Image (cartoon, rainbow, N blue to C red):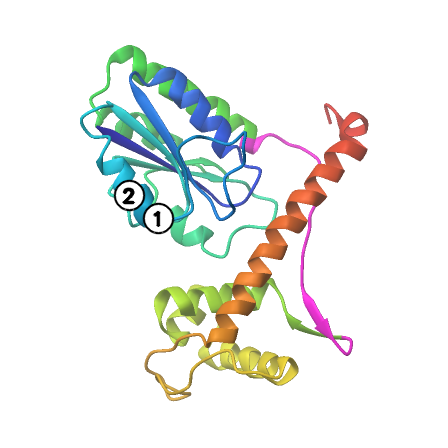
């Protein structure tokens, strides 16, 4: 069974649309999705909030299906997929791990997409000529959608206290990097900033928040490993949740209020 893993830089890039189009092309295929929220009544039957349960489900489909299409950001790097597809868009609020997901992908559709690699990657899957051609056509349509000029709404979220910003997108990306890489210096390098600057941002945020974000006992200012405190984890998780919901609701209102006005522009 061949596995197709689909990830995206942000919400609204068309992951579910791509899944549906691939399912129409790939013979004897199964689909599953991983999300954070409980499954909706109208949602897909194979929906998981646990990555481990999703991986177990995939392994049990080997003898029953020829293809398994997976919609998940969390499984990038955990699932040994035959092809990883990343959907990217130039504008909008990208995920904190978008650059990492992009680097781990075989095919990139959208912003700076590697169109020259499509044929080579698909030929390596040993699909029938008709299926290969159909998949390439699906990629072309998705790439066109992601790179087409459009009017969009930009939503940014930050936390303030006494008129000062205490937490926002930049610090959230830095904390995510520390949590993923286990090192402040490595996370700062990923963000393209110096260790000293990153450390200063964290210290200022801690002073304004009133609690520590990093556990100094792991490496401290001098270096070594770093990890988030429990409150640091909670803050990052809460920020991500409210950001996702705010963007989703903002996009819904944008389409409802401005859809007819900007249609075709």
Per the image, label 1 sits on a secondary structure element best described as helix
Report the magenta residues as a range: 146-163
Check residue 246 for magenta coloring. no
Contact check, label 1 and label 2, Cβ < 8 Å: yes
Image spot of residue 9 (x, y percent): 49, 45
Residue 48 in which image quadrant: top left
Nearer to the camera, 51 or 97: 51
| Side of 218 where 41 appears, left or right | right
Residue 60 in which image quadrant: top left
Count of numbered circles on the image: 2
Check residue 156 for magenta coloring. yes
From the image, give the main secondary structure of the stretch colored magenta: loop
Per the image, label 2 sits on a secondary structure element best described as helix
Residue 181 visible in this rendered orientation of the protein: yes
Task: Please give the name of the residue rendered at 42% of the width and 70% of the height, measured from the top-left corner.
Answer: 178
Q: Which residue is mark 2?
A: 55
Q: Which residue is mark 1?
A: 51
Residue 136 in which image quadrant: top left
Work out how far the residue at label 1 is from the one at label 2, CA to CA, in angstroms.
6 Å
Image spot of residue 137 (x, y percent): 42, 18
Task: Please give the name of the residue rendered at 54% of the width and 40% of the height, measured from the top-left corner.
Answer: 89
Residue 192 visible in this rendered orientation of the protein: no
| Side of 229 where 75 appears, left or right | left
The quadrant of the rendering that contains the C terminus is: top right
The quadrant of the rendering that contains the N terminus is: top left
């Amino acid at each position: 069974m061949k596995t197709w893993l689909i990830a995206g830089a942000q919400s609204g890039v068309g992951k579910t649309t791509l899944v549906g189009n691939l399912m129409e092309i790939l013979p004897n295929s199964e689909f599953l999705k991983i999300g954070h929220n409980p499954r909706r009544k109208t949602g897909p039957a194979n929906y998981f909030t646990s990555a481990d349960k999703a991986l177990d489900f995939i392994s049990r489909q080997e003898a029953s299906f020829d293809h398994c299409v997976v919609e998940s950001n969390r499984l990038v790097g955990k699932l040994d997929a035959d092809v990883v597809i990343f959907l990217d868009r130039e504008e909008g609020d990208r995920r904190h791990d978008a650059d990492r997901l992009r680097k781990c992908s075989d095919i990139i559709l959208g912003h700076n997409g590697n169109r020259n690699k499509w044929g080579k990657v698909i030929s390596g899957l040993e699909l029938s000529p008709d299926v290969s051609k159909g998949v390439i056509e699906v990629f072309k349509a998705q790439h066109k959608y992601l790179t087409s000029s459009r009017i969009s709404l930009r939503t940014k979220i930050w936390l303030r206290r006494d008129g000062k910003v205490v937490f926002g997108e930049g610090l959230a990306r830095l904390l995510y990097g520390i949590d993923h890489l286990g090192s402040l210096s490595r996370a700062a390098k990923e963000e393209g900033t110096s260790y000293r600057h990153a450390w200063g941002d964290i210290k200022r945020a801690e002073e304004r928040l009133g609690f520590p974000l990093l556990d100094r006992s792991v490496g401290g200012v001098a270096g070594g490993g770093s990890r988030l405190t429990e409150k640091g984890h909670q803050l990052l998780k809460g920020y991500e949740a409210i950001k996702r919901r705010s963007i989703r609701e903002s996009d819904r209102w944008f389409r409802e209020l401005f859809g007819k006005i900007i249609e075709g522009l």
